[in-house]
Amino acid sequence: MICIQRLCRATLSLLMGGAALFAVSSACGQVSPEEMVNPRLKSAEEKYFPQLHSIQQSIAGSKFPFKFKLARYLKAKPGQREASDSNGIEFVYFQQRLVLKISGIYKAAFNPTRLTRNERADRVFEDIVIPVLRVVAKQIPKDADFEGVGFEIIYDTRNAGSAYDYEGKEVLTAVFDRDDAVLLANATVNSDRQQTLNHSEVFLNGEDLGLALGQHDSLNVEALNRSLPRHATEVPTTFHESAAYDADVSTAKISPALSVTQTFPASVHEPSFADAMRLQSQFQPQLNAIVKEEGTRFHLEEGTAPAFEIGGNQTLLHLTLRNTLSFEKSTTSIYRRAAQSFDLFLAPELRELTRRLPENGEFDALELSVLNHLGSERTPSETIDYICPLDSMRQFVANRISSQDLINQSVVLVNGVRIGLNLQLVE
């Protein structure tokens, strides 16, 4: 949460096909359009795929002070499948903006006793962000229809003393408006870059950072022309959204889904992809266990791992499931398919599924994407998203509210279009 989004969240029809696609996309450095379920993200990936491939090739051929490689999951451990995913270029949603995100691992180790937090972030900004922005500025047309460019760069900090050798990691996260990204790429003096940075989103390990170029200490974030700073307890380490299928079409992160966000109560703070990434890192072992132990039982879609995402002002846990029901498009309506998919496929699994999910109050809703086959089509041709407030979901599985009550308190989308759904009326 970049290869062409937080969670997210892949439309792969067969396990072998998914494995082949994973191998191909890992080699090329950006997500294949066929991997995306969200229509707008898929469209963006298809539209800009040649440019993204050129960006990947340019990055691979560039010389950096230390080795830099694209990576989709920055905190994946060696041996995990995610660790071999080099799809570090993708489109994601961030605060209702479609953002081209570039993430990777910088093989630099900075000594924290010699360089301050600001100086370390400054080095990574100069070593990686600026050179890559120049590549992006050359490849992306001026009339591009996405809103921003984002970065997630992880690197090492190492303090070697006479009695011990301590090594840690830091993640620099930054999101720039598209025009600002071009300004940063073309600026030749730090004063011009600094002015742009002062109103951009910059985080270090989840904390707002007033990055001061060429300085010892960072700037006071509260004095900058940006949104109110968030505390470390509120903002996590990175924004992730790779493989994410967003909830306008599924997580309400952009466009028509802005109205969707009104369905849920406002969070205490405006979440970011950094929040999603912190939760992803915190609960990745638990999510991996669900996929490994219960993936077949719950019909979780191969190649689309559970992912935390940001939808409007909400944090969502997004799961994608393959429907076991069969429908004929000519004899059923979208309303009937949505009702039966919930009543006959999804609802019976919710009690056991929710018992396996993280039990904390740090995310607001579940997004359950159900992939439908229509007729004899081999690949899913319809996606139904049920975006359910977590409290309502818990009340439903405890038999405190009916299935219709849960639907009334949720958002239902069919291929990205919101619908009203009366379960009994269309059965």
Image (tube, rainbow, N blue to C red):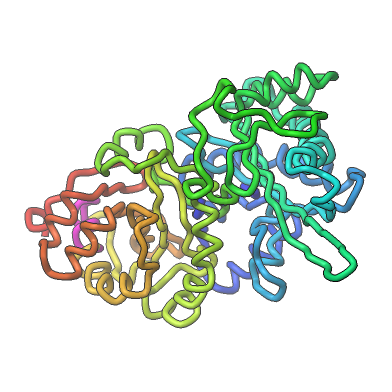
> Which residue shows up at 55% across the image and 47% down it?
274
Q: Which residues are magenta?
A: 331-341
Q: Does residue 54 show up?
A: no
> Which residue shows up at 56% across the image and 55% down it?
35
Q: Which percent across, then down, holds residue 1?
A: 57, 51
Badge count: 0
Classify 209 as above or below 243.
Answer: above
> Which residue shows up at 11% across the image and 60% down it?
427
Quarter-wise, where is residue 101 in the image?
top right
Quarter-wise, where is residue 74 in the image?
bottom right
Classify 353 as above or below 252.
Answer: below
Q: Which is more toward the observer, 370 or 242?
A: 242
Q: Is residue 29 left or right of residue 393?
A: right
Classify 277 as above or below 43.
Answer: below
Q: Which percent across, then down, holds residue 87?
A: 68, 55
Classify 220 as above or below 18.
Answer: above
